Image (cartoon, rainbow, N blue to C red):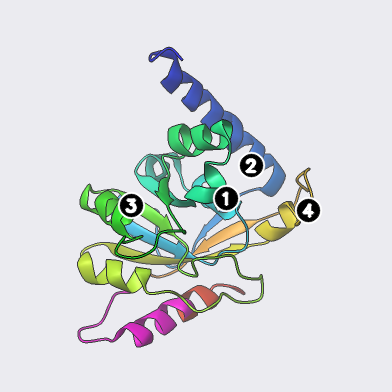
Amino acid sequence: MNDKLSPLLAKLMGLFLLGLIRTLTGAQARWQGCPPKAEQRIYFANHQSHADLVLMWAALPEELRSITRPIAAKDYWTKTPFKKWITTAVFNAIYVDRAKTGDQDPLEPLVEALAHGDSIILFPEGTRGNHEEPQKFKAGLYNLALKFPGVVLVPAWINNVQRVMPKGEVVPVPILCSVTFGAPIALGDGEDRGEFLARARQAVMDLRDS
C-alpha cells in the first residue's frame, strides 16, 4: 500500500467506525468522577466483549483518542490481516500475547507504552467476564501503578456492550451503550497488592448503577 495513502485510509476508516459505533450504540461517555483531560492515564474497566476495546475508544473525545492506546489480545485481533490493520493503524492498540509463558513478561508492551508517555485502556480481569460484576483483577494494574506512580488511574464501567454482538451472532444489534468514568484512585503508601486490586475492582463496580 502506498505510504502516503495508508494514513489517509486509516483516518477515513476511523471516522467511519466512529460513526458506525455511535449509530449502533450511542457510545455515551459519562464523566462522573473526573473530566476528560489530556494527562497520562490508565483507564481500567470491566470486560464483557471483544467490542469493549472499540466502545472505549469511541467514547473518548478526539483529543484523548489520539493519545490513548487500548490493550488488544494478540491471538484474537491479529487473526486476519483486516483485524490487524484496524487495531494497528486505526486504534494504535498495544498487543498482549496471552499465550506467553516462562520468563516472558506480558506487561512489557504496556510498560513500554507508558514509558513513552501514552495513556492506555486496560481490562484488569485479563479475560471476559459477565455483565453482573467483574472477575477478580489480576496483578497487572497493581504492577503498573507501582512502576508509574505519576500516571492517573481512572476506573470505568462499560454497560450493555455484550448485547450489541451476542455470542454466536454475526450482525450487531443496535443497543444503547455507555461508558461511565469514575473518580481516579491511587496506590496507597504500603498498600499491598490484594487490597489495592480489591479496591480498584470495587471502584469499577460502584459505577454500575450511577
What residue is disc 1 on?
55
Task: Name the kind of residue labelled 4 in the image.
Answer: Gly
Of label 3 and label 4, which has the lower sequence position?
3
Q: Which residues are magenta?
A: 185-201
Query: In the figure, residue 210 lies in which quadrant?
Result: bottom right
What residue is disc 4 on?
168
| Residue 105 percent across, percent down from the top left | 31, 61
Q: CA distance from mark 2 to mark 1?
A: 7 Å
Label 2 near label 3: C-beta < 8 Å?
no
Label at residue 119? 3
Q: Is residue 78 above or below residue 148?
A: above
Q: Secondary structure at mark 4?
A: loop
Q: CA distance from mark 4 to mark 1?
A: 19 Å
Q: CA distance from mark 3 to mark 2?
A: 22 Å
Task: Name the kind of residue labelled 1 in the image.
Answer: Leu
Q: CA distance from mark 3 to mark 1?
A: 16 Å
Q: CA distance from mark 4 to mark 2?
A: 20 Å
Residue 176 falls inside the magenta stretch:
no
Label 1 near label 2: C-beta < 8 Å?
yes
Q: Give neighbour class at mark 2: few <14, some 14-19, many 20+ (Cα, 10 Å).
A: many
Q: Secondary structure at mark 3?
A: strand
Q: Residue furthest front?
A: 102
Q: Give neighbour class at mark 1: few <14, some 14-19, many 20+ (Cα, 10 Å).
A: many
Q: Secondary structure at mark 1?
A: helix
What residue is disc 2 on?
21
- The residue mark sitting in front, 3 or 4, is 4
Q: Could you say which is closer to the camera, residue 121 or residue 176?
A: 121
Q: Could you say which is closer to the camera, residue 23 or residue 31?
A: 23
Of label 4 and label 1, which has the lower sequence position?
1
> Which residue is rendered at x = 68% and y = 48% of the image?
25
